[in-house]
Image: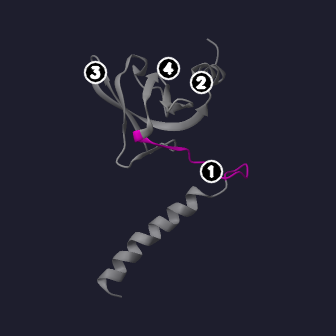
């Protein structure tokens, strides 16, 4: 096998394996869903507690981002951005939400889930369902 063929095989096999994993059925038999948004379409982001961010994409498209774990001081975040090498942010814990914390400096948190919501009120309802009462 030539060096070029070896390089091609080395690149194609992992990509094929990852592709198979991404579409593999979950334990309940449903297919894994990967929600992604093009970062340049994002108009505004506002924190909603320490695990959620409301995202406005256009006039009538809204999303709720949920980070992997409670992200310290996310509710006080300034300059929210997406820390991603590609032009898309996905809710599969590979994309990062970056922000500036007033005292701690730059922070990043993994985006675990992206859900489409009709508006901010619906996002707040989803958060209320996820959050157990104190």
Residue 117, percent across and down?
61, 30
Q: Marks 2 and 1: which is nearer the front?
A: 2
Measure the C-alpha gap from mark 4 to mark 1.
Answer: 26 Å
Q: Disc 1 designates what residue?
A: 32
Q: Earlier in the sequence, mark 2 or mark 1?
A: 1
The quarter of the image holding the C terminus is top right
Disc 4 crowd rating (10 Å Cα; few below 14, some 14-19, many 20+) is many
Measure the C-alpha gap from mark 2 to mark 4.
Answer: 13 Å
Front residue (pair 55, 58): 58
Q: How is the image coloured?
A: one colour
Disc 3 crowd rating (10 Å Cα; few below 14, some 14-19, many 20+) is few
Q: Earlier in the sequence, mark 3 or mark 1?
A: 1
Q: Disc 2 designates what residue?
A: 119
Front residue (pair 35, 129): 35
Q: Which of marks 3 and 2 is nearer the N terminus?
A: 3
**Label 4 close to label 3 by CB (< 8 Å):** no
Measure the C-alpha gap from mark 3 to mark 2.
Answer: 31 Å
Could you tell me which secondary element the residue under label 3 belongs to?
A: loop
Q: Marks 2 and 4: which is nearer the front?
A: 2
**Which region is colored magenta?**
26-40
The quarter of the image holding the N terminus is bottom left
Residue 46, percent across and down?
45, 22
Q: Which of marks 4 and 3 is nearer the N terminus?
A: 4
**Label 2 close to label 4 by CB (< 8 Å):** no
Q: Which disc is residue 104 wearing?
A: 3
Q: Earlier in the sequence, mark 4 or mark 1?
A: 1
Q: Which disc is residue 67 wearing?
A: none
């Amino acid at each position: 096998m030539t060096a070029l063929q070896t390089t091609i095989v080395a690149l194609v096999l992992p990509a094929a394996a990852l592709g198979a994993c991404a579409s593999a059925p979950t334990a309940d038999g449903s297919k894994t869903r990967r929600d992604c948004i093009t970062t340049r379409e994002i108009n505004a982001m506002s924190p909603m507690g320490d695990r959620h961010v409301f995202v406005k994409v256009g006039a009538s498209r809204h999303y709720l981002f949920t980070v992997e774990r409670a992200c310290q001081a996310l509710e006080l975040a300034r300059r929210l951005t997406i820390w991603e090498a590609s032009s898309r942010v996905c809710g599969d814990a590979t994309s990062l939400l970056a922000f500036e914390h007033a005292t701690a400096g730059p922070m990043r948190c993994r985006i675990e889930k992206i859900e489409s919501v009709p508006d901010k009120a619906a996002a707040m309802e989803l958060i209320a369902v996820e959050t157990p009462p104190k």
